[in-house]
Image: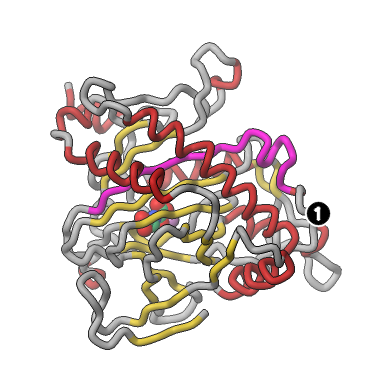
Amino acid sequence: MEKKQSGTGNATGPATKEVSFLNRIDLSSPDIHQSVSLLKQACLDCGFFYVINHGMSEELMEEVFEQNKKFFELPLSEKMKVLRNEKHRGYTPLFDELLDPDNQVHGDYKEGYYIGVEVPEDDPKAEKPFYGPNVWPSDDILPGWRHTMEKYYPEALEVARAIVRIIALALDLEADFFDKPEILGQPLVLLRLLKYPGQISDPSNGLYGAGAHTDYGLITLLATDDVYGLQICKDKDAQPRVWEFIAPLKGAFIVNLGDMLERWSNCLFKSTLHRVLGNGQERYSIAYFVEPSYDCLVECLPTCKSEKNPPKFPPVIYGDYLGQRYKDTHIDLNVYNKLQS
Ligand code: OGA
Ligand code: NI
């Protein structure tokens, strides 16, 4: 990972803080060996990399950002009509999520909107947590909004599948290892629109756009605008922790590995701690969390263990893990019921 001091900074960049530029994985490159090697290096080093030439058009990415902005500009009363439900679909108001309770005085200074796998209510799969129908803002209020999101969702999944194949190769597995029915056959994908209002974060007083956390699943595809904010910490055990900004890269996805890849790979690959600091400017981002199916059993890969290096984690059912992480980090929905009654 290259580093540089951005001496004077620019309109949106930090003036003195250290900025990191990540390895770029070019999905259009015919040199798969080079892609595997660049990706592997990034996964061993910091668990973050850029993906470029990924096949999703700039128009679609821009359209999603425009629609994203339009939603969050609605009056709060309108947004509360599509408040997050127990299936984790819909609007998450400011402070709804508290990612790092030990270091935050209140929830994250961000608003969000969750869109997941569309499962009709009468489908037996909808009995499981996280599977169910989406909620949508009315088409009269935001024409074309749902259509845009429904276009982005499967296209981003194609990009994710291509990345995951390279990850499999980097772990000495068959390229289609993660395509199994229980992993990416019916993945638990969550598209999350995010807006960080123009608040200035203040880590020494426990105020953050998003508190320090790792992502939970396989990988996350993050699209951001050009406002700085995302930081990573390569060594979560170091004291004090060292945080580096990740430079936004137009048209690219910033991709990071989730906790399941750390477990599958027995900590060879990293699910790196990251957070978001507000710098006083509004910031928009679009996170696309690619996660295994609810019932997937995640256990150490044969290529990542040996007699000298036994599994560091017990096997886990992904849905149990995810359910617990959401419970730990989101406000109990009853709080909103009480506020509204
Ligand atoms: C997340 C996340 C970063 C960002 O939603 O998990 O890390 O830049 N988002 O919004
Ligand atoms: Ni994250």
Q: Position of residue 13 (x, y in %)?
A: 27, 73
Q: Does the magenta portion include 190? A: yes
Residue 92: percent from the left, percent from the top? 30, 39
Residue at 31 percent of width and 84 percent of height: 6
Reply above or below: 269 against 341: below
Whether disc 1's CB lies below 8 Å from ligand 2 is answered no
Q: Residue at x 49, y 73 (%)?
A: 22
Q: Residues within 10 Å of mark 1 (few under 14, many from 20)?
A: few
Can residue 100 be seen in this snapshot?
no
Where residue 293 sits, quadrant-wise, is top right
Residue reaching furthest top? 122
The amino acid type, in three-letter code, at marker 1 is: Glu
Q: Is residue 69 magenta?
A: no
- The quarter of the rendered structure image containing the C terminus is top left
Tell me, yes or no, if residue 196 can be seen here: yes
How far across and how far down the image is residue 333, in percent? 32, 31
